[in-house]
Image (spheres, rainbow, N blue to C red):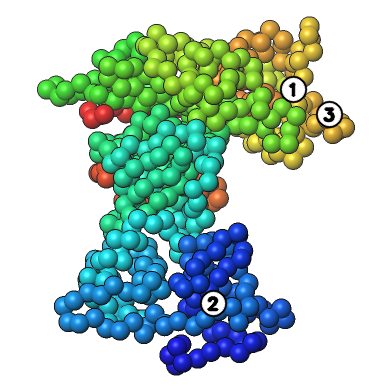
Amino acid sequence: FLCEASWRPGPRESLPTGWRWARPWCSTRLWRAPRSTGVAVVVSALDAVKGRQGVRVEGESEPLALKPTNLTATQPDAAVPPAPAGQATDLPPSGEEGLIAAVQRLRFARPQATTKELHAALSAQEWPSLTLGELKKAASKAAKRAPREADPPTASASLTRAEPPAAAAACVPFEAGSVVTDRDGRKFKVVKSRKDGLVSVITTGRQRAEMRQEELVLIDTARNTCPTGFELITQSPSVGSIHQCDALAEIVAERAAPPQLMMRPWDSFGVCAQRCGSPTIEGLVTHPQLAWGVPPGQPPAQSRIVCFALDAVAHHLVIEWRVGRGWRLLQSYLRPERAGPRYGEIGYTALEWVTATRPCGGADTSAHRRFGQGRWLSDADVLQILQAINRLRSLTDALVTRCLLPQTPFRIGPRPQEHDRSALQAWLTSVEPVGEWAGEKIHAAESRGATISRPPGHDVQVALGDPMRGDALEVLFSVPEAAAAEIDAAYAEFTGEKFGAIHYLRLLNYVESDYTQYVKTAEGRAKLRAKQQERERLFKTSQLDGAQRTEKERDHFGWVVRCIHWGQD
């Protein structure tokens, strides 16, 4: 190209896209600039019909349409005169801004690049006479600015200083020195986290930028340890907003515990009780020496975590413990469709559960007051939670055997005693079709809906269909009113929610789960591989180390638990 200074556009002549021009005045946005200095803009497009040139003003996000006659050519970036040997020069405003933008682009494209590597890359492109001094000056200014819209490091391209989203505003700012990751898995170190949801971070390439808190997830604390589940939820908006209980439990297990937790198998309630030297899972609290014992000569564990996968009743939860402080219950509950009549009454997010922003529980909010709101719980409190889970398991097991199985379309006799192994095995074989039948009904409920009716003084009925849409109901089975009330109370005692129609179907879908090994379908195996790859990425990103970084295929469902303790907090 010719030097811009030697070229003038005619009244309707277009300007070369990508060249830099000065606008002598601007009447838009009620803002003016002195004619003598002008405002640097970049030509981006031409509207030949309207005779307007599309330009972008540096420092402004919205493009403007101006007449070409209102634009005056200036010296191009590439024409900046070379500096004397060994001496840096002050670049013209347009050239300096272009260099800052180029540095930002390279920093985020190549976060590991050193200053000399950046200098070599820029010198080989449009900055052949660039000195290290000029580069360092531009890099210093680039580090103080937010990422440009055209070159976003993450999904936070439209970063502004407007009011933060509600999710970010409700969260606790990150602690300076913490390590976070964005949605692409890139790692950043927190320099400062503000209450308005903006976080100043340093990339692995030592580039400083501002990002939104809702785009980041805590992975390591400033103490170089894994965060507690409570810290993860309260500081990471994307985690705090989770209302799907299994998704929450999974991310808490992955990020709020050492990697070794994922290596441990899922144990049935019976196996867990045996490890604790107790008749039930209550031994996790009542028999701590056996449940959480350490080898001789080792110091007592400082931290514990227990993950419950209660698939048979469609609920997952996590209980964590810290020495000198106690326990915390972490959970969320799936909300109905936003358009549903009871949206806002049923279900809660992880952040809502650990805070007092709103009462949680569509059936009973006392569980939230007793076990939630971020409270540190005593052994007695957690014992009540374990007792409620045990009571729910006992009630539902009895209901399945005595009430639900006889109402399925299969001929199933009474359950043999445990000591009669051959008869019990034959009975378990006869029960196998029930799980598949219940799975088909659950699949049908996804499209038709499932309804539970509780008329006073009558049995509770579970049916497929939605009477609100005028559907004819397909009654599947009935449950005695007293038995249903006991199950409702036990379930609400730790979740705050009612036992629904899907929960009864899930009981049959996981019938006799302690004696069943579940084989994943091809789709299930693909999902497992995807999770393992994601877990590998997390292990590589985290500062924590694990001897083994994959989880063996899970084959136990229904009522299972996995726990670990470790020495560092």
Q: Residues within 10 Å of mark 2 (few under 14, many from 20)?
A: many
Query: Are dots 1 and 2 in contact, CB under 8 Å?
Result: no
Badge 2 element: strand
| Quadrant location of the C terminus in the rendered image | top left
The x and y percentages for residue 72 are 52, 81
Disc 1 residue type?
A: Ile
Q: Give the labeled residue for mark 3.
A: 467
Precedes in sequence: disc 1 or disc 2: 2
Tell me if residue 207 comes above or below residue 89 in the rendering: above
Q: Position of residue 363 (x, y in %)?
A: 64, 17
Frontmost residue, 20 versus 487 = 20
**Does residue 233 appear in this view?**
no
Q: Are marks 2 and 3 in contact (CB under 8 Å)?
A: no
What is the distance, in whole Å, between disc 1 and disc 2 at their CAs? 64 Å
Q: Amino acid at mark 2?
A: Val
Q: Where residue 541 is drawn, which disc sits there?
A: none
Q: Is residue 82 left or right of residue 497?
A: left
- List the residue tagged with mark 1: 452
Q: Which residue is mark 2?
A: 43
Cα–Cα span, label 2 and label 3: 61 Å
Which comes sooner in the sequence, label 1 or label 3?
A: 1
